[in-house]
């Protein structure tokens, strides 16, 4: 991913788990000072305590199954002080287990948001069409394939 983005002329930094939690904010600020356009990381590494105001577009290549992690990582750019439009994008292959997972994550997030008073209007909620657990829907898709 990094190589492809760099070949397109973008400056890319990869935040790895080896960067201590207490140093991540400073590490990211150093990358911004160096003119980095793109930050690649695992959502687990940025799910709490970081503001990514300099990266208003968040693109998920993978999400995992943890709703809390997805919700938190997706909101890192959407903070007080953000002056740019924020976009959160989820990539997946149509008809794949990845899309099934995203649809189920959307359902879980919709339930989570409705219990906290938020009304989803975009993002993963567009994939939320019915109810099921992530594991059951993935198993059903694999059996039917």
Image (spheres, rainbow, N blue to C red):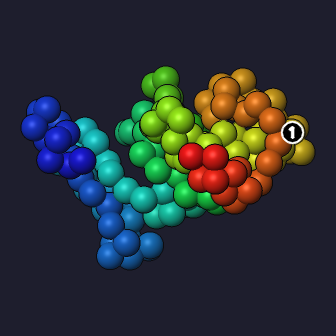
The number of numbered badges drawn on the structure is: 1
Q: SS for tag 1? A: helix
Is 139 rendered above or below residue 16?
Answer: above
Q: Residue at x 64, y 46 (%)?
A: 144
Is 83 rendered above or below residue 17?
Answer: above
Foreground of the two, 59 or 54: 59
Q: Quadrant of residue 103?
A: top right
Relative horizontal placement of residue 11, taking residue 53 as reference (left or right): left
- Point out residue 55 in the picture as x, y percentages from the top left corner: 39, 39
Q: Residue at x 17, y 41 (%)?
A: 4
Asked whether residue 12 appears in the rendered view, the answer is yes
Foreground of the two, 141 or 43: 141
Foreground of the two, 54 or 133: 133
Task: Kindly identify which residue carries mark 1.
Answer: 114
Asked whether residue 11 appears in the rendered view, the answer is no
Q: Residue at x 45, y 36 (%)?
A: 93
Relative horizontal placement of residue 14, taking residue 94 as reference (left or right): left
- Point out residue 24 in the picture as x, y percentages from the top left corner: 39, 65
Mark 1 burial class by Cα count in 10 Å: few <14, some 14-19, many 20+? few
Q: Residue at x 20, y 49 (%)?
A: 2
Q: Quadrant of residue 115?
A: top right
Relative horizontal placement of residue 96, taking residue 114 as reference (left or right): left
- Point out residue 142 in the picture as x, y percentages from the top left corner: 59, 53
Foreground of the two, 136 or 45: 136
- Point out residue 50 in the picture as x, y percentages from the top left corner: 50, 56
């Amino acid at each position: 991913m990094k190589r492809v983005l760099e070949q397109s002329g973008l400056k890319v930094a990869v935040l790895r788990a080896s960067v201590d939690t207490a140093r991540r904010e400073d590490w990211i600020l150093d990358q911004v000072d160096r003119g980095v356009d793109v930050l690649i990381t695992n959502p687990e590494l940025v799910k709490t305590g970081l503001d990514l105001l300099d990266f208003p577009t968040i693109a998920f290549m993978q999400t995992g199954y943890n709703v809390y992690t997805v919700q938190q990582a997706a909101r890192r750019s959407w903070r007080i002080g953000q002056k740019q439009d924020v976009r959160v994008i989820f990539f997946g292959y149509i008809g794949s287990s990845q899309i099934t997972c995203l649809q189920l994550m959307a359902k879980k997030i919709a339930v989570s948001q409705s219990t906290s008073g938020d009304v989803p209007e975009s993002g993963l909620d567009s994939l939320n069409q019915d109810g099921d657990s992530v594991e059951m829907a993935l198993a059903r898709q694999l059996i039917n394939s």
